[in-house]
Amino acid sequence: MAALTLESIRQAPKALLHDHLDGGLRPATVLELADANGYSDLPATDVDGLAEFFRTAAHSGSLVRYLEPFAHTVGVMQTPEALHRVAFECVEDLAADNVVYAEIRFAPELHIDAGLSLDAVVDAVLAGFADGEKAASAEGRSIVVRCLVTAMRHQARSLEIAELAIRFRDKGVVGFDIAGAEAGYPPTRHLDAFEYMRGNNARFTIHAGEAFGLPSIHEAIAFCGADRLGHGVRIVDDITERPDGTVELGRLASLLRDKRIPFEMCPSSNVQTGAVGSIGEHPFDLLARLRFRVTVNTDNRLISDTTMSQEMLRLVETFGYGWSDLQRFTINAMKSAFISFDERLSIIDDVIKPRFAVLIG
């Protein structure tokens, strides 16, 4: 059996459900796009300095402050060429980390400052993903990338973005999301968007239970009907661990486990935003032991200075996971993907299981 090191984990197939396009740019690309598009507000003018800025800003202990550096990445993503390049490089970087399936999310409404329509924004991103897939395939790396369109929870365009998701549902968009600061902006503000998605037999996830507590998770599931939870770490507040080692689940936690609601967990990001104190304090392991459907994700590869392999390694080093655990988390993600059953099964049976079998030995 191959040892679990960063290098060996890089060889494992991975499925990624929670990754923000505007949080995963290469620092060099940010600089080059800023120069090409006349964006002059960057806090540094060299690759190392800019990378350090993003790393430092991420470790803020606050979701609101963690989100502030996105002004710079979004600022350089206002043209079709920039959006295509960022999407293309996203696929390149994921494929190099042996991600075989990814759902990448972004908020089209943040990329119209230079006059692009919402449709033109999505067109450019989807073209970048498609070209990235072709380039990866030419290099012998198979990867499927699909898109989630996100509405900002503090704005009032969520129904418009949900309609955008349906317009592009057969072109690469597989779902809808809301994101942004949670406190003061409950998911129920966007019920019309979620009702529209359900009315069109479409899938959606909701950021909930990251910076806010159990009420946001309850609303996302009970009132909005979310198919998945973005983060959801505060579900631990509905789980009691007794001194004798037994565990009692509250009604909400029991419901989520019984319904197999997937948790899009992002360990490093959750530490950086202050949702948890450390990887060791993260509820990921408790939820995994209790057989919740937990998945491993990056959230923002640039902002959090991470990759899927690094996220898995941190969990391995903290909780002692082996190859079979990483395979289970990966299959959890594929079972929870917003593509068809046949597509999910094909990736699980033809890609993930055979490649893990080689690693497990």
Image (cartoon, rainbow, N blue to C red):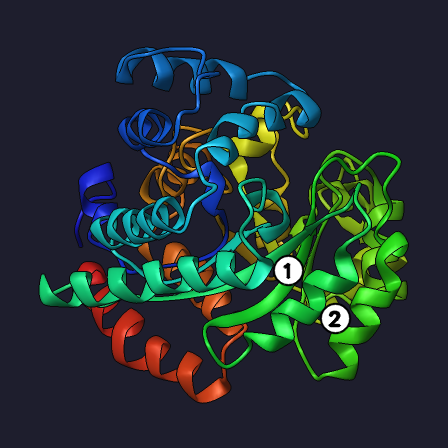
Q: Which of 350 and 196 is in front in this view?
A: 196
Query: Is the residue 166 above or below the residue 285 in the image?
Result: below
Circle 1 Cα neighbour tier, 10 Å, few/some/many (<14 / 14–19 / ≥20):
many
Residue at image position (31%, 30%) is: 36
Q: Position of residue 241 (x, y in %)?
A: 76, 41
Where does the image place residue 206, in percent across and percent down from the top left?
71, 55
Task: Please determine whether, in this image, residue 103 is positioned above or below residue 239.
Answer: below
Secondary element under disc 1, as helix, strand or loop, is: loop
Q: Tell me if I can see residue 281 in this picture.
A: yes
Q: Quadrant of the C terminus?
A: bottom left
Residue 280 seen in the current view: no
Depth check, front residue: 147 or 11: 147
Disc 2 crowd rating (10 Å Cα; few below 14, some 14-19, many 20+) is few
Task: Give the residue type that dot 1 points to.
Answer: Phe
* Residue position marked by numbered label 2 in the rendering: 258
Q: Which amino acid does label 2 sit on?
A: Asp
Position of 71 relative to 266 (above/below): above
For label 1, the residue is: 292
User: In the rendered structure, which disc, 1 or 2, sits on the residue that comes first in sequence?
Assistant: 2
Q: Distance between the residues labelled 1 and 2?
A: 8 Å
Q: Outermost residue toward the bottom?
A: 342
Which quadrant of the structure image shows residue 310? top left
| Numbered disc total | 2
Left or right of 197: which side holds 341? left
Please, what secondary structure does the residue beneath circle 2 have? helix
Q: Where is residue 78 in the image (x, y as percent from the top left)?
A: 48, 41
Give above or below for 146 relative to 46. Answer: below
Quick check: marks 1 and 2 in contact, CB under 8 Å? no
